[in-house]
Image (spheres, rainbow, N blue to C red):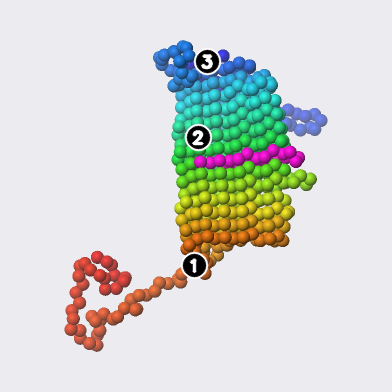
Amino acid sequence: MSLIAGDIVLTQGGYHQAEIYELETKTVQQVVDFLPVPILAVSGGELNLITQQGTGEIILGNDAPSHVQPSGSFTLERAWLNVSGTPSSKIRLQTDKLLMSNGHIFAENRGVSPAGMIDIWAGDIQLDSSSITASTLSASGAPIHISAENLAIAKGISLSSTTIGEGKGGDIEIELEKEMRLSHSASFLTANFATGKAGNIHVQAQNIKVLDGGFISSSSIMGSGSGGTIQLQASDTVYLESEQYMGQASLSSMSIGDSIEAGTGGDIHVRARHIELVAGAGINTSTFGAGHGGNIQLQADSVRLTGKSQDAQAFPSYLSASSHSFFDDVPAGNAGRIHVQANKLSLEIGTNISTSASQATGGNIQLDINQQLYLHKSEINTSVFGGSGDGGNINIQQPRVAALNQGQIKAQADVGNGGNISIAADHFLSSQNSQINASSRLGIDGQVLIDTPDSYGSSSLLLTAGYFLQTTDLLPLDCAIHNDVLSRFGIKKAPHGTPTAPEDFIY
């Protein structure tokens, strides 16, 4: 089915609320049902939707372009596009502006053949309380591909790809010329609930912003399939902020499994010119079963984590890889690794980079910093709580300056050995109340190695006194102020020259 028009509008679906009296319980229940919703559906074929205004040119043959430059708008408001089937169909949407409000696109693959594709080409895309969903059971799920100039999404599980069988979940691929903005609890989600691998998520744009509880997640839940990889790539900035949703990671990968064959969590890769995590934003990989946690890798010119304190509440930003087991008879998998490559890395106001494990081995932290590493009231930590697992190692390589201002670097364990801490820097500064610790409660302490030609330890970095030296008291008395002896010299201040005392202005 193909539908071509200047503008396409599917709208005016609604809700119906009714009250039902239960005779047995003698209660009144409120039931909300859909009123008839506009549905455009194709099963087992292909659905093409194109908005094109004005005159144009039609090219037939092998040299015809696969995508034309669209104009016009496509509006999906309280309406559905459904291409589910055996297998699910392919949907291709080309428009200048895609507007979805309580609109939904479904692609459920019920067959054994690979699913079709959800392919969207647009100028600007705005999704509000809307969703684009692909799911599969036995075969590969439908990939979701979006190519646009700008993408703004708010509210709800907006893009999702899931597998509940042995089929691989479809990938989510987003290519933008300018900006992606994910806000107000909007999310991208891939997940597997069986043996199939979850789909990957790849976002490429000039700027990527995840705000106000928005999140991107890939998970393996109660199955042997692994979680998908999350990859964000920005030519300028990746900016994550999560002030009102403390504890919810902006980017997350998770593995939950009650058997020894539980799947591993997916990896997270972020690459940009600038990466900022602000006011409680987090990047987290975690495992709650036998599957190993995923790894985190950041590459940027500058990486900055900063927290926020407001109304007696702290909102610390973080990078974390953790391992814990929900199940008594299932050992926990090892925590993932964290690797940061940057010219500058700054951790401020309670933020942390950490790996942690319970009954397992902690992950390693590798920081390759070219210019400056700065910790202010923040922490780099690899810890093991309980069990015989060893603490992870912390390796900080070759910044010109590594500065700890009330900062902590710790690699600690319980019964196992403490992790090793290695710092190689041209200049190393540590304030009096900073700490570097590689201890174990019952095991062998780890080693701390600081390799630097210039080290300024806590003994030489002290708080200054609360007053300044009065240098005028050390100067010889000016002959002009001797009242008991008549001076033979006249003092004349030049309009330009050295001041008579340090506190005088220099002209």
In-front residue for pair 78/67: 67
The quadrant of the picture occupied by the N terminus is: top right
SS at circle 2? strand
User: Which residue in the protein does label 3 denote?
Assistant: 3
Label 3 Cα crowd, 10 Å radius (few <14 / some 14-19 / many 20+): few
Mark 1 crowdedness (10 Å alpha carbons): few <14, some 14-19, many ≥20: few
Query: Among all residues in the image, which is located at the extreme right?
Result: 24
Q: Which residues are magenta?
A: 247-271
The answer to whether mark 3 and mark 2 are in CB contact below 8 A is: no
Marks 3 and 2 sit apart, C-alpha to C-alpha, by: 30 Å
> Helix or strand or loop: what does disc 1 sit on?
loop
The residue that disc 2 covers is 204
Within 10 Å of disc 2 (Cα), the crowding (few <14, some 14-19, many 20+) is: many
Q: Residue at x 31, y 70 (%)?
A: 503
- The numbered mark at residue 461 is 1
Residue depicted at x 20% and y 70% = 494
Q: Is residue 138 magenta?
A: no
